[in-house]
Amino acid sequence: MARIRLFRTIDEMQSSSLQWKREGLRVGFVPTMGALHEGHLSLVDMVRPHCDRLVVSVFVNPTQFGPQEDFNRYPRDIDEDLRLLEEGQADAVFAPEIEEIYPKDYATYVEVERLSSVYEGAVRPGHFRGVCTIVAKLFNIVQPDVAAFGQKDAQQVAVLRRMTRDLHFPIQFLVGPTVRESDGLAMSSRNAYLTNEQRSKATVLFRALKAAEACILAGERNADKVREAMRYVFAEVPEFKPDYGDMVSPESFEQGTEMRGEVLLIVAGRIGPVRLIDNLPVSVEP
Ligand code: PAF
């Protein structure tokens, strides 16, 4: 097995990608903030058949964290990430220092309007501006033909899809399904912050989503009743402080009133200091 290559500078990464492309090779890309888990590795598996060279970025992006958020304590373990990616047969890892990406005089940001200011964007002002900025920069550095993102961050997927389209990046956009623990908790690097007791309460998010889905599948077509089903489940776990539990359009994140076609159930909130999000796409039969 060829050893994975580790690139630390923009120049090394970009020139390797451009060389691969000159050789007619297709470049696949999975952007991450490291602390890799099965969810990330499933994206690597998903992209591999679509490309000849597979790059994973590992960069905890400061511009997508608010001042009171967990940037400093976000889990970082590049050696373990490299080991997992070598096993997962990625070809290269791009893991730059912050100053490489954001030099002192850095001044350019990318923002998708409207979609970035609701739900996650309302609770975390500036978050999607940071996400779009770093992903646009990574697209320019890695020059991928195909890139994969996880459905776990459904609003991020909607925002980045729009950015990719609006800025004409010629990149095929793949979305991998949410990978869950056996009790339904969506895998996330932030789950590592949960104490054992908080961990056992954290299933409330998935249970609320499943309750709302069951309500729809049982024939309920009143959107308020579907939201009420989530609130009942939230109320069973007083330690959970919900930010929202809602039903939206998966593309626009506009609140759903019409129960037709594809809808997205979304939940978010805190257990102790740990903020968790989850979602479930549902097809509504007429
Ligand atoms: O989903 C993530 O891990 C991050 O938001 C991303 C896309 C790597 C940008 O920093």
Image: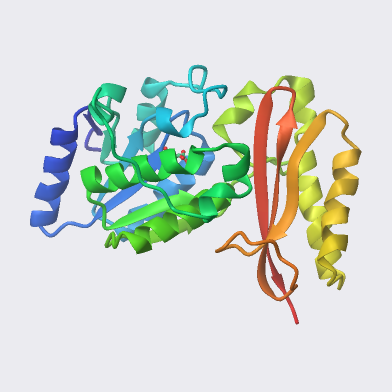
* Residue displayed at 48% across by 47% down: 42
Expressed as whole percent of the image width and height from the top left, the position of residue 79 reads 37, 21
Is the C terminus in the top left, top right, bottom left or bottom right quadrant? bottom right
**Type of colouring:** rainbow
Residue 61 appears in the picture as rendered:
no
Q: Nearer the viewer, residue 216 or 246?
A: 246
* Residue displayed at 36% across by 53% down: 147
Expressed as whole percent of the image width and height from the top left, the position of residue 197 reads 79, 22
Q: Nearer the viewer, residue 163 or 193?
A: 163
* Residue displayed at 83% across by 28% down: 239
Q: Quadrant of ligand 1?
A: top left
Residue 138 vertical position relative to residue 171 in the rendered view, above or below: above
Q: Nearer the viewer, residue 150 or 63?
A: 63
Q: Is 131 displayed left or right of 264 in the figure?
A: left
Is the N terminus in the top left, top right, bottom left or bottom right quadrant? top left
* Residue displayed at 30% across by 52% down: 28
Expressed as whole percent of the image width and height from the top left, the position of residue 38 reads 52, 39
Residue 135 lies in what quarter of the image? Answer: top left
Q: Is 205 displayed left or right of 105 in the figure?
A: right
Expressed as whole percent of the image width and height from the top left, the position of residue 33 reads 43, 33
Q: Is 29 displayed left or right of 74 in the figure?
A: left
- Taking the view exactly as shown, the residue that stands out farthest to the top is 72
Residue 159 appears in the picture as rendered:
yes
Residue 166 vertical position relative to residue 194 in the rendered view, above or below: below
